[in-house]
Image (tube, rainbow, N blue to C red):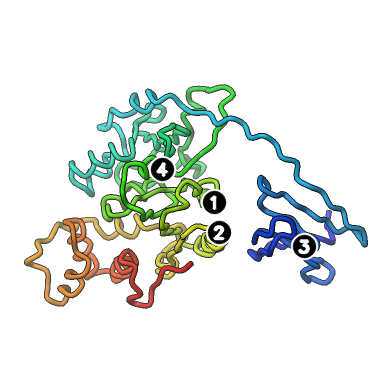
């Protein structure tokens, strides 16, 4: 059925007439293709406001959102995390990391992110979502290819992914997810947080750039108020995957109006790469077969870069790679929050 009045599908938001927040979505008149009076529309802040005014001919139907007490959040027992923290020789993701990083770095990220192993699929990994109060909210079980580090898929092209909740058949479990790595904000003095979509990317980038607290949304839709609320007082740098820049930028604009400090990088969006490419892909695709180089062997043409940004052995690898791939130089500039090469962090 075709309706004359439909909600505006663009990213435009206006001041809500009730709560006065920039969260109001207007109506489009399909006959004129014009935005209707902003007396009509709905507030996206459903749990805080929920105002809606619906046009129907010349009649205005106005309803108020009825507040419902939220369900109590369910948590997994912490011993499940402890029990999964073994069998890493059979964990495809960990074995892949061994082809990239040294043993010390791998041990650090396992303990840092409490990476687990699952027997559900041979070689599967568990990514635990532990909140800022050390409560275990979710366990995502995924299967990676030990050689490529990419997610394995079945014959139908569907990734192997499930949850601890489903595997242990937890009844009446009210799943309320949070950012992957959120527990780290209570363990660090840093006030700078870097956010990516994938758990794998957060883990890998935490080795390349340990000066940031790397968190992951776990999905494209995870970049939202409910997930980011615990880090509202932090300086947040978001690195969306290829083609997701505009989506995350629009959300960041709305969140910044609520007191957040979010900068969204367009560095991946500007690169010539496939849809879905993320930071880890850029680094990993270029690190293969490259050996660690000694500082004394770095050519003089690279010295200017080195003096500004080279701090760790991993950075030396990146510097060597940057000679072959200028995309890495652009990424390095972004991490240092400069505007070199015309790149910037936008809000």
Instruction: Determine crowd level at label 2: few under 14, some 14-19, many 20+ residues with C-alpha closer than 10 A.
Output: some
User: Can you name the residue that lies furthest to the right here?
Assistant: 58
Q: Residue at x 74, y 60 (%)?
A: 17
Marking on residue 224? 1
Q: Position of residue 296 (x, y in %)?
A: 6, 66
Residue 346 against residue 78 in the figure, above or below:
below
Q: Residue at x 49, y 49 (%)?
A: 228
Q: Is 29 on the left or on the right of 13, as rendered?
A: right
Q: Earlier in the sequence, mark 3 or mark 4?
A: 3
The secondary element bearing badge 4 is classed as helix
**Label 2 – label 3 distance at C-alpha:** 20 Å
Residue wearing tag 3: 27
Q: Residue at x 47, y 37 (%)?
A: 161
**Label 1 – label 3 distance at C-alpha:** 23 Å
Q: Earlier in the sequence, mark 1 or mark 2?
A: 1
Q: Are marks 1 and 2 in contact (CB under 8 Å)?
A: yes
Q: Position of residue 202 (x, y in %)?
A: 36, 49
Q: Are marks 3 and 4 in contact (CB under 8 Å)?
A: no
Q: Earlier in the sequence, mark 2 or mark 3?
A: 3
User: Can you name the residue that lies furthest to the left here?
Assistant: 296
Q: Is 303 on the left or on the right of 75, as rendered?
A: left
Q: Earlier in the sequence, mark 4 or mark 2?
A: 4
Q: Position of residue 318 (x, y in %)?
A: 23, 62
**Label 1 – label 2 distance at C-alpha:** 7 Å
Residue wearing tag 4: 182
Foreground: 189 or 99? Answer: 189
**Label 4 – label 2 distance at C-alpha:** 20 Å
Q: Earlier in the sequence, mark 4 or mark 1?
A: 4
């Amino acid at each position: 059925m075709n309706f004359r009045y439909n909600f505006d599908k663009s990213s435009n938001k206006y001041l809500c007439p009730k709560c006065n927040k920039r969260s109001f979505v207007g109506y489009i008149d399909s006959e004129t293709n014009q935005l209707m009076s902003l007396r009509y529309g709905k507030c996206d802040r459903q749990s805080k406001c929920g105002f809606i005014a619906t046009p129907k001919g010349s009649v205005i139907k106005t309803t108020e959102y009825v507040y419902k007490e939220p369900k109590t959040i369910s948590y997994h027992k912490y011993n499940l995390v402890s029990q999964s923290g073994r069998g890493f020789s059979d964990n495809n993701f960990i074995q892949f990391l061994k082809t990239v990083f040294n043993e010390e770095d791998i041990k650090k990220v396992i303990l840092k992110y409490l990476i687990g192993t699952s027997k559900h699929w041979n070689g599967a990994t568990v990514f635990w979502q532990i909140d800022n109060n050390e409560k275990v909210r979710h366990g995502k079980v995924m299967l990676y290819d030990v050689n490529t580090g990419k997610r394995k898929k079945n014959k139908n092209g569907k990734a192997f992914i499930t949850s601890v909740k489903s595997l242990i058949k937890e009844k009446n479990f009210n799943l309320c997810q949070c950012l992957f790595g959120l527990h780290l904000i209570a363990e660090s003095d840093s006030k700078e947080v870097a956010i990516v979509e994938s758990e794998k990317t957060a883990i890998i980038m935490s080795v390349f750039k340990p000066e940031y607290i790397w968190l992951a949304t776990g999905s494209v839709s995870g970049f939202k108020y409910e997930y980011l609320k615990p880090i509202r007082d932090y300086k947040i740098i978001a690195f969306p995957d290829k083609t997701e820049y505009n989506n995350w930028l629009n959300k960041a604009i709305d969140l910044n109006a609520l007191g957040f400090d979010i900068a969204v990088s367009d560095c991946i969006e500007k690169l010539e790469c496939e849809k879905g490419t993320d930071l880890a892909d850029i680094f990993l695709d270029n690190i293969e077969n490259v050996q660690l180089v000694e500082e004394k062997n770095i050519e003089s043409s690279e010295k200017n870069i080195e003096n500004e940004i080279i701090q760790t052995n991993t950075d030396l690898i990146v510097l060597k790679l940057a000679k072959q791939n200028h995309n890495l130089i652009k990424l390095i500039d972004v991490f240092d929050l400069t505007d070199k090469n015309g790149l910037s962090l936008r809000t």
